[in-house]
Image (cartoon, rainbow, N blue to C red):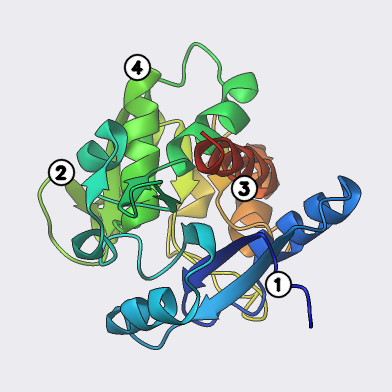
Amino acid sequence: MANTPKNRFGLIGRNIDYSFSRTYFSQKFEAENDNGCIYENFDLKDITAFPEILAKYPDIKGLNVTTPYKESIIPYLDELSKNAQEIGAVNVIRFKKNGQLKGYNSDWYGFNTAVKPLLQSHHKKALLVGTGGAAKAIAYGLKQLGITATFVSRTNQVNCIHYEELEPSIFESHTLIVNCTPLGTFPNIEAFPPLPYHLFTPQHLAFDLIYNPEKSAFLQQAESQGAVVKNGYSMLVFQAEKAWEIWNK
């Protein structure tokens, strides 16, 4: 009889074959000789298929959630942590002993831990490119750091600036720019948000949640103007370790 894993973990998302999480946790389990754990991708065409995963794999102990389901997963959960509720997005699901599912957000923690060493006293305002679940988590994290965040989007929304409204005065006062969109991710590495890159300066810090490629087109253009740049790899490591901590409470 084949051995079944004692602890099954996985990632909920769409088109996630590239998954950082599966590679990271598989290597983690191997390095720690934890043969009782397995991590796999659950690629869903629609979030309505989520209950089918739960029924098929009753041994799941914890899940990560990625684009585009960080917000739409919430109605399927029994409970939310305080920060996940405030953010309005979930990227970690803990399977409680009573069978209930509790949603958490570790994205903000991962981002804060990664960005803190790079912050200077003049980084008081930030522009967040994108308005999805990841951007909401970053806004929450920046709030904890005392940094005011404004979203940038193609559509007109509350507390949101349209790309066409990004004037020099806005760039001058917002010296932290975070790309929270998937633009530029492999294999579409030539894509980038339509920002006025000539307005970046050495005073700016450009942070991209993307980690593949290592230096996205967004980061390359910001760096060409003297900006300090950082990709999202370390953020992903920090949020993954926080997820592991949550699952093993």
- Per the model, the C-alpha gap separating discs 2 and 3 is 27 Å
**Disc marking residue 4:** 1
Residue type highlighted by circle 2: Asn
Mark 1 Cα within 10 Å, few/some/many (few <14, many 20+)? few
In the picture, the disc for residue 25 is: none
Tag in front: 3 or 1: 1
Name which residue type carries label 4: Gly
Q: Is residue 147 visible?
A: no
Q: Residue placed at 59% from the left, 74% from the top?
A: 41
* First of labels 4, 3 by sequence position: 4
Nearer the camera: disc 2 or disc 4: 4
On-image quarter of the N terminus: bottom right
Q: CA distance from mark 2 to mark 4?
A: 17 Å
Residue in the image at 64% along x and 72% along y: 40
Task: Report the amino acid beneath label 3.
Answer: Leu
Residue at the left extreme, as displayed: 158
Circle 4: element type:
loop
Quarter of the image holding residue 6? bottom right
Q: Earlier in the sequence, mark 2 or mark 4?
A: 4
Residue bearing mark 4: 146
**Mark 3 lies on residue:** 236
Q: Residues within 10 Å of mark 4 (few under 14, many from 20)?
A: few
Q: Which mark is residue 159?
A: 2
Labels 3 and 1: the sequence-earlier one: 1
